[in-house]
Image: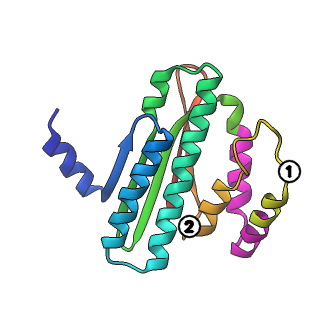
């Protein structure tokens, strides 16, 4: 393994921070601290830096929550090592990308949510966010369902996503948010 080559490729791709592996609560916190310190030292508007940090937090929590749910359902622990989160900078934008394995049953509802968000303007997203806050959640809910909405609200372009089929019949979900 040529680490200099990997480092050079990451620099060429504009990658500032990358984490690959299992996302525990502690890892999300520690990475969050590192991301925050990096963004504080970077040149840029404070509001844009806060958007990048918020998107990072939402993306990391989504990966962690989904992974924990899959582990509880009997998923292979090795699958969690395929989780990834990357923050890159291209031109005058940051991009936060995250990826994790998902069940095939989750592809359609997730696609529908993402397509619905893509069709909304900022005011509609704000209304959707407030509506989601007021909804009652069942005992099996992982959260308030606000993560994707919050990322879409802070994004400067539509969310980009892809589902790549996996050998186990599931898929690998990749999401990129340009801020």
Q: Quadrant of residue 173?
A: top right
Q: Residues within 10 Å of mark 1 (few under 14, many from 20)?
A: few
Establish if 90 lies above or below 142.
below
Residue 179 visible within the image: no
Residue 63 visible within the image: yes
Residue 121 spot, x, y in % from top left: 71, 72
Q: Quadrant of residue 42?
A: bottom left
Main secondary-structure element of the magenta-colored stretch: helix
Which residue corresponds to mark 2?
155
Establish if 166 lies above or below 112.
above
The residue located at (33%, 54%) in the rendering is 17
Q: Residues within 10 Å of mark 2 (few under 14, many from 20)?
A: many
Segment colored magenta:
108-128
Element on which disc 2 rests = loop
Picture disc at residue 136: 1
Q: Quadrant of residue 68?
A: top right
Residue 26 spot, x, y in % from top left: 45, 43
The residue located at (70%, 41%) in the rendering is 142
| Left or right relative to 154: residue 120 | right
């Amino acid at each position: 393994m040529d680490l200099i080559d990997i480092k050079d490729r990451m620099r060429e791709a504009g990658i500032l921070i990358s984490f690959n592996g299992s996302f525990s609560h502690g890892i999300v916190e520690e990475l969050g601290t590192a991301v925050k310190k990096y963004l504080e030292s970077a040149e840029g508007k404070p509001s844009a830096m806060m958007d990048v940090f918020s998107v990072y937090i939402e993306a990391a929590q989504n990966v962690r929550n989904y992974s924990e749910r899959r582990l509880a359902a009997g998923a292979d622990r090795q699958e969690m090592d395929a989780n990834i989160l990357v923050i890159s900078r291209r031109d005058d934008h940051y991009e936060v990308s995250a990826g994790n394995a998902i069940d095939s049953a989750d592809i359609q509802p997730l696609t529908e949510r993402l397509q619905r968000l893509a069709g909304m303007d900022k005011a509609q997203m704000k209304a959707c966010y407030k509506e989601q806050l007021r909804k009652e959640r069942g005992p099996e809910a992982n959260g308030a369902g606000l993560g994707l909405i919050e990322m879409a609200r802070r994004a400067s372009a539509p969310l980009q996503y892809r589902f790549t089929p996996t050998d186990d019949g599931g898929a690998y979900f990749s999401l990129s948010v340009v801020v």
